[in-house]
Image (spheres, rainbow, N blue to C red):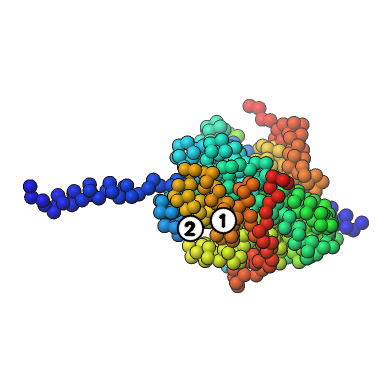
Amino acid sequence: MPDLLGYAAVQTLNALSFSALLLLNGLGLSVVLSLMNFVNLTHGAFFLLGSYVGIFWLGSGAPWWLAFPAAFLASGLVGAVLERFPFRQFYAQPHLMQVLLTYGLSLIFADLMRWGFGAQILTPELPETLQGVVFILDMPFPIFRLFLIGAGVALGLALWLLLDRTVWGAVLRAAVSDRGIVETLGIDTRRVLTLVLVLSAGLGGLSGALGAGMLAAYPGLDEEVLLLALVTVVVGGLGSFGGTVAGALVVGFALTFSKVWFPEFANLAAFAVLVLLLMLRPSGLVAPPLRRI
Amino acid sequence: MRITRRLALAGLPAVALPRAALAQPRPLRIGMITSLSGPFTALGESMRAGMRLLLVQSGERFADRPVELIVEDDQARPDDGVRKARKLIEQDRVDLLCGVIHSGVALALRDVVTEAQKPTFILGSANDLARKAASPYVLRPTKTNWMLGSSAARRAYETQSGARVVTAASDYAAGREYVGDFVTTYQGLGGRIGRQFWTPLGTADFGPLLTAIAAERPDSVYVFFAGSDAVRFLRQWKEYRLAGRIRLTGTGACFDQEDVLPAVGDAPLGAINTFHQSPTAPASAAFVEAYRATGKPLPGEFSTTGYVCGQVLRAAVERSNGDPTGNWAQTRQALFDAPIDTAFGSMPFDPRNGQAILDIHVNEVNAGAPGQPLVNTVVHTYPQLRDPGPNA
């Protein structure tokens, strides 16, 4: 049965590539949410901005691979400006206030981007090297999707090393659990938090540039990806890196295989699985250990 | 008293103004409801651009009566559409209403305008609008979904009668109608239908669907997707190397000249679609040229529809000597009496339901000028299709 085997293999790869996109998208959101306890609903806007930057870069004829750092920098820069004002004033506010602020900002950004980039649907011109296809047991699978899977794994790994295995990551985690103590060590925690937000916004932009190859870019995409990112982060479990990875895999596989098996009830089936998971594990797949002081 | 120059000047307007005001009839207010945010943003802006072009060409006057256009955004949500319609009718006191892309909004609006007895030109295309939801206050200067689905089936059977066709479409009212009418007509002619695939509206990843289609190995696939769904589907259609291996046919919206084709490269080259609009249709040549002269790309469905709607509104005003609402039944009858010359071609109305009778073109997606997007090129036309209407 090479046909069925190839079919299963390619559908699994489909799910993996979608999971990679969800992971990239979710990481930026979860970094800020879990490390800074800040709900940032402008994340979708960072993603869409990155998509537009990536598309214009790829269309400009400059070296294609620089499109991704460019998108990172552009969104990171916007993140840096927003962090200064008004995000910083809201770190200590309750979540509802943060939601109101950042959702309002996301609407403003949506209009600004529609004004700046137009309402038409844009897609990137992928370089020749990414346009190819590999045949797996006679079933076609695009190389661009392998690239997405690779990028997801590489970035996830890099971020994990940065946050879990470096002094900088240790400072950051310390600043989150007890800001006062870290300040007494002579570290400017405000700058640390700025860096996290810039990193998160940049990741949003970077995933936007990568995701544009699959999703295209148009007004309204920001809300769609924000929703996917929230689902990913919540299913995986707030506050843990492994959780976001698990969340991305579960959501990616649920959404893909629900389309394969129950195409007419794809969303119903996928989200029923996710609701069930949340009922069984209300704090997410990978819940961080509760800290008591 | 000596009359100074200043006095004379000051007195002039006082004499001249009332006369000018008398000669100036009350402006005709037209309300347009369209989607300027939400999933149909680009389509809504095209519709408005088409209508604006017609107004500019008419010198902002119909039958020598000045025209004011008020545009409201329905966000592609029925409740918002109804709210905006009430606002236009009650607050802005518009004389005529037009617009709408989303079928749900169109059906919700139908009841509101019928109750308010407000003449309305609805541009959504649900079959029911020409059937059980037809209304004496609603005119429909655009296609119904049946016209496209059934003509696609006829064309498929006439050109490739032995083909096994699978269908793939967005799972909502419009997709169900297009595919339903395609399947019924194709099977009625004796054609073979394979699996029917449905995906939710707003699908991010078409990989699973395309892999399933590849495994099915049909001769041909009939599709309906719109907007971003269409762009993603067509790009991924090429990425998964189905382009060239399986014949692609579909609804015109999936290959919209303005909304979809500029964003998909050469992915749908050679695809066939049925549509009431084509930039290469002879009837639309003058409009296409004027639209491009405003710096826009080749027009697609909704810019043309907005323009055509303006042409029909203008005809309504002209055939009622500048007062279309004074006796609406008479105006309506005047529109039914003789076809209207539009960018969709000569447009007669079906008096049973106020539905336009339209030429439906078979478009082949061909290469454009070097560096330019693909072009929908008319290869065949089914003239003057009439929706089955209330008898369906």
- Using the image, tell me which numbered label, if any, was put on residue B112: none
- Element type where label 2 sits in the image: helix
Outermost bottom residue: B370
* Residue at (79, 51) in percent of width and height: B184
The residue to which callout 1 is attached is: B338
- Where is the N terminus of chain A found, in terms of image quarters? bottom right
- Report the amino acid beneath label 2: Leu
Looking at marks 2 and 1 on the same chain, the residue that comes earlier in the sequence is marked by 2
The residue to which callout 2 is attached is: B53
Comparing A110 with A128, the one in front is A110
Q: Is residue A208 visible?
A: no
Vertical side of B13 occupied by A41: above or below? above
Real-space CA distance between mark 2 and mark 1, rounded to the nearest whole angstrom: 24 Å
Do the residues at discs 2 and 1 belong to one chain? yes
Q: Is residue B31 left or right of residue B379?
A: left
* Residue at (8, 50) in percent of width and height: B2
Task: Categorize mark 1 by other alpha carbons within 10 Å: few (<14), some (14-19), many (20+).
Answer: few
Where is residue A99 shown, x and y percent of the image?
56, 36
Where is residue B44 shown, x and y percent of the image?
55, 50
Q: Quadrant of residue B131?
A: top right
Task: Categorize mark 2 by other alpha carbons within 10 Å: few (<14), some (14-19), many (20+).
Answer: many
